[in-house]
Amino acid sequence: MSSMHRTIEGQVLVNHLTQDEMLIDTTLLAQHGRSARTLVKEGPLRVTIIALAANATLPPHSANGPITVQLLDGDITFDVAGKEYPLQKRDLLVVAAAVEHSASSKAGGTFLLTVVHGQ
């Protein structure tokens, strides 16, 4: 199924983050330092798994709705409004709507991003 058609079919969607679901495009990761796969796209809700390569960054940006970030593995540091938040495995970071943030990784890492658009 294309990652852009991952809607909730019925009242509940259970997604076990197995190795198949967490499949990251290693070619994109090597070429661009990052790769992402949308797991859920339903109305204003987006859930995406994102990988950063070693020494990679996500440039500063903001979302029009609140976001959460959960580190799955590796190391990721988020810079939110000028303050650094180095995340450890299973940490959950919550960022309010329209707050500028960026991310970087020294060794590489994978995180789960949840965005609620249009809040």
Image (tube, rainbow, N blue to C red):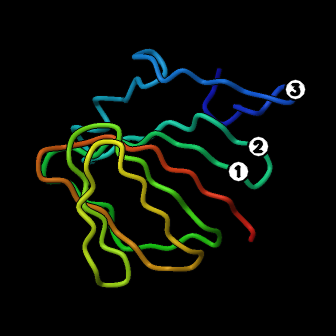
Q: At label 1, which amino acid type do we have?
A: Leu
Give the position of the N terminus as an image quadrant: top right
- Along the horizontal axis of the image, is 46 left or right of 90? right
Mark 1, residue position: 45
Mark number displayed over residue 10 = 3
Give the camera-side residue of 111 and 90.
90
How many other residues sit within 10 Å of disc 2, few (<14), some (14-19) or many (≥20)? some
Mark 2, residue position: 42
Q: At label 3, which amino acid type do we have?
A: Gly
Give the CA separation, mark 3 to mark 2: 12 Å
Secondary structure under tag 2 reads strand
Q: Please tell me in which quadrant of the rendered image residue 96 appears.
A: bottom right
**Residue 52 screen position, x and y as percent:** 27, 46
How many other residues sit within 10 Å of disc 3, few (<14), some (14-19) or many (≥20)? few
Q: At label 2, which amino acid type do we have?
A: Glu
Mark number displayed over residue 86 = none
Q: Residue furthest bottom?
A: 82
- Does the CB distance between marks 3 and 2 fall below 8 Å? no
